[in-house]
Image: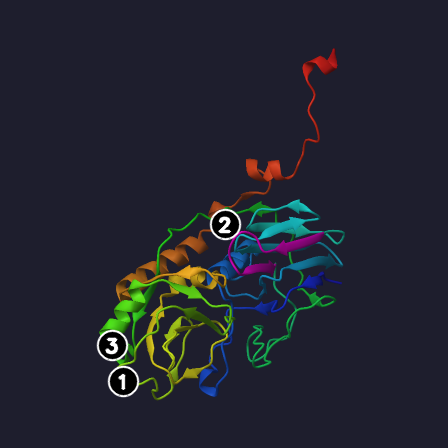
Amino acid sequence: MTGQLVIHAAGPGTTIQDGGRHGYLRFGVSAAGPMDWQAHARANILAGNPENAAAIEVGLGGIEIGAEHGVVTLGFAGAHFLVTRDGRSLPIAGRIRLKPEERLSVKPGVSGAWFYLSPAKEFDLAPVMGSLSTSLRTGIGTKALAAGDRLPLRAAPLLPEVRFEPGLGPARPIRVLPGPQDDYFTPEALDRFFANPYRLAPRSDRMGYRLDGPPLTHAKGFNIVSDGIEMGAIQVPGDGKPILLMADRQSTGGYPKLGYVIRADLPRLAQCRAGETLRFERATIELARSELFAALHEVRSTMARAHPLGLSSEFLLSQNLISGARSMADES
């Protein structure tokens, strides 16, 4: 029997997500997929999987899992969560071999909102409409994961354990490509959006991030002929408060969109928690393209920057390898 993962505990909204359910938007079916595409891809790469393979997406409720019927190789990456194996600290990104007698725990840490666990060779589950992604609002795909669930896995080789230390990116505003309905707003409203801070509202989820801040004035009303929606779209309904459409967005929308968050900045946006302050700045198509290529290169070079697990001084200190100290006088 091949190995499987068993869920011992899981917070609300813990789901399986692959690269998304594409090709069905014209039928009103959401693509779903990961909130943080870069961390999702990194966890898969660390597991030896394709970038868009299925992984467990973990929110602020955390998760605790174990292995059954054999050792399971797991890649993991995401926000600065607290990751432990049987109580011993692990790096925030890497690859481990999880033995049946061990438990892996992931809990929210100092920052970020999403974390990913990817088993080598993926889950042995039947795709729905070509994807394993879960859309909780539409009920398409697997249900939210809960304690007692068992996830069968395909047979996979045991890979060596590694750690990965992601660098800290620049603290800068979220970049937005204006359009396609930016002409539906007064110039003063657009300037206000890019000049003022906004706060991520508590009523935010995988479908949309709502912003609290200066309301935006429409110049041509707040209704348009519904058109397609992609992740990162910034819709502004009648109350003037922007909504950023995320992974579980609807397929079409009838409110004007002042712009789209560039794809390279979607991971930073997705990892914001309710109450955090966001700022935005204008971007160009040329910038959006070059930043996307840089982001893809960064994630695809993950294994070139990975190291054997346990070699960093921070990791060794976290393991409490020395229980005490003795002086030379103790030996005399």
Q: Which residue is mark 2?
A: 303
Q: Residue at x 44, y 51 (%)?
A: 301
Task: Establish if 235 lies above or below 303.
Answer: below
Q: Which residue is mark 1?
A: 220
Left or right side of 319 for 189 = left
Q: Residue 132 placed where, x, y %? A: 58, 73
Instruction: For mark 3, give the secondary structure.
Output: loop
Does residue 312 appear anywhere in the picture? no
Q: Nearer the viewer, mark 2 or mark 1?
A: 1
Instruction: For mark 1, give the secondary structure.
Output: loop
Q: Residue 317 placed where, x, y %? A: 61, 36
Tag 2–tag 1 contact (CB < 8 Å)? no
Q: Cα distance, mark 2 to mark 1?
A: 50 Å
Q: Residue furthest front?
A: 214
Q: Which residue is mark 3?
A: 186
The amino acid on which the numbered mark 1 sits, given as a three-letter code, is Lys
Task: Establish if 98 lies above or below 200.
Answer: above
Q: Residue at x 52, y 47 (%)?
A: 164
Left or right side of 302 for 328 = right
